[in-house]
Amino acid sequence: MELMIIPVVLILGILAILGIVRANLKICQPNEILIFSGRKRQLGDGSRVGYRIIQGGRGFRIPIIEKVDRLILNTIPIDLTVTNAYSKGGIPLTVRAIANVKIASYEPALNNAVERLLGKQLSELANLAKETLEGNLRGVVASLTPEEVNEDRLKFAKELVEEADNDLGALGLQLDTLKIQSVEDDRGYLDAIGRQSTAHIISTAEVVEAENRERAKLAEAEADQAIVKAQNDVRILKAQLSAKASAEEAKIDVAAQVARAKAEQELAEQEILLAEKRQRAEVVVKAEASRSAKEQEAIGDAARILEDGQAEVDVLAKKLEIWKNAGSDAERLFLIQMLPDILKEIVKTVDNLQIDKITVVDSGGSGQGVPAVFSQIAGSTPALLESLKTSTGIDIAGLLRRASESSGSAPQTTNPPATTAIEVAPEVAPSTGDGEAGNSTTPG
């Protein structure tokens, strides 16, 4: 039980402390002043007072010893109306103005406000400030003429503020603004001044208007003269510009003609060049194309001839190689290869001989006529070979005989001659089988 009482007491103590702090901690708003009364305090000038002032922020009131009061710093508007306020010169005036005052927030006027205005209502402060300002307003009006009060209201308000600041500061008040709304009089003095000023202004305005009319007429005459002069200058300028334009047009025409002539000349030159190019295209280019084609054709023929010659060279080289490989059979091989050409040359000797018909007459009636003809043809072969030997120097019969003897004495298994005979056989077969060989026996 005792353990539970201790926390409760602590909590209650804390709450009591917080309540005391809350009750005695005073927050000062921006539009107010807090006055803590009950303790002595020394001011800046060395005097001692029984209060302290807090402006903005917060302060802690010591319970029982101190008391807290508030002064509101809000603006207090005041309407001022002063009648029969005699101005300098004895003219009574009625002045209406509006002022805005508040409790002063600067020292030492703030101390005056604490001592004089603490506990008063705003209405009481407004009446106090109004009575003070009305007295000041009458004093300022008495030092100024009606013209100064009416015409220079800024000066009037400035002097009024300067005079009222001291009185209001002694009360702890501060004048924020003061505006003069109207200044009137019951005797019509200000109206007379106004009419006089109006008449003077009107007369001055009439004089000024007359002078302005004269100046306007003079200016109009000068303007007319200037206009005439300007028109003359314009006509002269137009004439000059027209002459200059004509000269420029003439120059432009001449330049155009020159340019046209140059253009025609250039066109003619271009036509000549075009004709030359056309002629060149028709003749020279065609000739060059023909020459180039012929050159290409000649190059092709030369290449073909070169290739044919190279082929013949290759063939001859191969034949030479074959002959070298043939050894003793080379002569027979050469004879066999040349035999078709030799026979062609022999046939050419009787190529123009035309045999229409051969008639064989068997005079004995023994049936030996046709065999006899073929026997004669076979008998004429040695004579033909002998004639070929005489005309060409080639002994075909001897060559054939030696070749036969060589082939009879040589072994049959020798490969190179057999290979050579097989290679040249296609060249001999066509030549021995055509009609020309048959015709060669007919003349015999």
Image (cartoon, grey):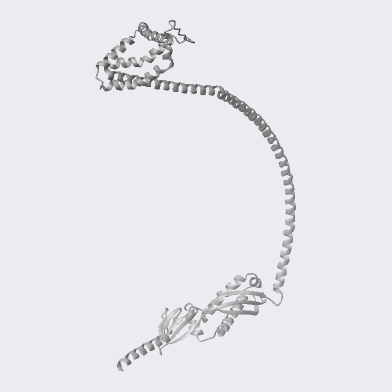
Nearest the eye: 434 or 6: 434
Residue extending farthest front: 366
Q: In this view, does 428 lie to the left or right of 207?
A: left
Is the N terminus in the top left, top right, bottom left or bottom right quadrant?
A: bottom left
Residue 205: x %, y % from top left: 72, 61
Q: Is residue 6 above or below residue 177?
A: below
Nearest the eye: 130 or 395: 395
Residue 56: x %, y % from top left: 45, 78
Q: Give me the residue at 32% from left, 17% from top.
A: 333
Q: Quadrant of residue 167?
A: bottom right
Q: In which quarter of the image is residue 363?
A: top left
Residue 62 in view in this figure: no
Q: In which quarter of the image is residue 410?
A: top left
Residue 30: x %, y % from top left: 48, 78
Is the C terminus in the top left, top right, bottom left or bottom right quadrant?
A: top left
Q: Give me the residue at 72% from left, 69% from top.
A: 195
Q: Is residue 58 left or right of residue 232?
A: left
Q: Give me the residue at 44% from left, 21% from top.
A: 301
